[in-house]
Amino acid sequence: MYKFWLESLLFNDETELKPSSLTVIVDPNNVGKSALLREIAERLTKGHAAPRAVLRDIIWSLPGCLSDVREAYRIQRHRNENLNWEQRVLSADLSNERRTSITGDSTSEDWASGLGTFFSGSRQSYEEQFVLHFGHFFVAWLTTEQRLRMVSLGESPTDERQCASLLQLLYQHPNGREIELKIRSFTKEAFGLEIALDFTALRSLHLRVAKDLSQILGDPRDARQILSQYETLDNQGDGIRSFVGILTALFLVNRPLYLIDEPEAFLHPPQAIQIGRLLAQSAGPTRQILIATHSADVLRGILSASKEVTVIRLNRRGSNNVVKMLDHQRLRSIASDALLSSARVFDGLFYHGVVVVEGDRDARFYQIGADKLKSGLDIHFVNADNKQTVPRILTLYKEFGISCSGIVDIDVLNDSSEFLAQLKALQLPDKAVEEAKSIRDEIEQHVLKSGPNSRLNRVADRVQRLRETVDAHSNAEDASQVLKEIERECYRILGETKAWGDLKRSGRSRLPEVLAVKFDRLYKICAEGGLFINPAGELESMLVDYNFRHSTDKSAWFQVAIELIGNLEVDLAKQPWKLLQDILQGFR
């Protein structure tokens, strides 16, 4: 039996995609995912005249003869008011009724007399006529704008075959009541509200919304008094209207190809996850769903409900689109990984580029600085939670073809094996890796040269100061201030116990000139692979050029720094602008 199926999409970069039953398109903003769906919809309903900015060609299954279509999808012709034959169907965008006239023998039930000639011409002519006559029977195209209107107040049908809206179809469908209850159940779960079709006004159809609709009576005359007390769906928020529109189209229309643009629009994260699950569960061997999304939550919902999904990422280089197939097993592993999922790694799929940093404060600080340095950036700063996870996340993004960089504190050099793991993630040439390791070893020799006795002496000095602070507490007017100073001094003592503590606090400036030059070479090697070692040492040293000293009280430092950086003038001779400038140059 004939099955309408989208077999191949040939993109303008020569990439060929064979869509599965469920295909998800992700991309940065304004790259082309919505245009892709529009081109598919127009090609399959309007013919070859449709513009093709993203796609070069589309191939779909064609029937061998007219009877194959008729038998597989029960497409019927009917007499209109002028006694001419026509086909009637809800349009692909589900907004109005489409009527297609059929020429040929006006008395014969055999359609071949009028349409059979389409099957004997060239493939191009065949495709053209096929989509013009049958395209709207096979495609449901749910745009963001149209979803808000699909289930709005509309007129009741004027005859038993009219299908000018989803609500008319819901009213006339043989299983309409069952479908309505199914939609009601999912809407209750997502929003805590139920919906019901109100046809009691006879000339109009609309959906009513309430927390409990169990009191509705069967007779429209009796139900009218009850339903009129409830709000209409048209007066509800965009989220529930969009949600109900998608579900009604999925459960009611039953077409073999659905094109759904940004199903997450107007939805909160839990609802976006739920719509992702429902979309995944609705795809199958006789139904293809193509989803264009900019939501990590929708993607999480899809991956949680489907083992077979095709995910592609669109990007743009100049005026050309670039297509990258993403490994859905890798995506699923991210979704199930507690650390990676909490770090918002998925969000990076929807940006032009990603910068991976050690912590949440780093991400917020550098994001503000980068936006100030260059407005209109489409760069996502990801908190890896620690420097050990930075190379792991960078590797993932590189596998997905996403431009990415990482920022780590200078103490990444204090462990040879950990630093090697960072270098491996950069995919650098062996010669560059060996040079970087050699410089790291020289820096380590310098750091450890003073020995533990020197650190112990510094700790002793700090402890003496701490004793003096504690001994003087009885003369203090504010005990809370004394306790804060004791806390800060304890952090300083802890820092003095670490061999690399001084270098982490002061960065490159603590190295002798010859070694500082070698560090610059090390910085350049790593930067070529996308990893930037903070020359200032760590985040809390990034504003020393503005006389804002390093502090061991990271929370207090950050509260001041986050406001300060937003008010600073950009000076590329100072940090943090020098570092951010180097990073952003890699995202051109």
Image: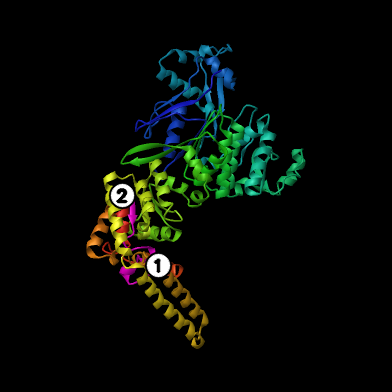
Looking at marks 2 and 1 on the same chain, the residue that comes earlier in the sequence is marked by 1
Label 2 Cα crowd, 10 Å radius (few <14 / some 14-19 / many 20+): some
Q: Residue at x 50, y 15 (%)?
A: 64
- Disc 2 marks which residue? 586
Is 347 in front, or is 67?
Answer: 347
Which quarter of the figure has residue 55? Answer: top left
> Image height check: is 191 above or below 178?
below
The image shows residue 193 at horizontal and vertical percentages of: 66, 48
How many labels, in total?
2
**Residue placed at 33% from the left, 55% from the top?**
532
* Amino acid type, callout 2: Gly
Residues drawn in magenta:
527-550
Identify the element where label 2 is drawn: helix
Indicate yes or no whether the magenta region holds residue 546. yes
Q: Is residue 471 visible?
A: yes
Residue underneath mark 1 = 561
Compute the Cα span from label 2 to label 1: 26 Å
Does residue 262 show up?
no
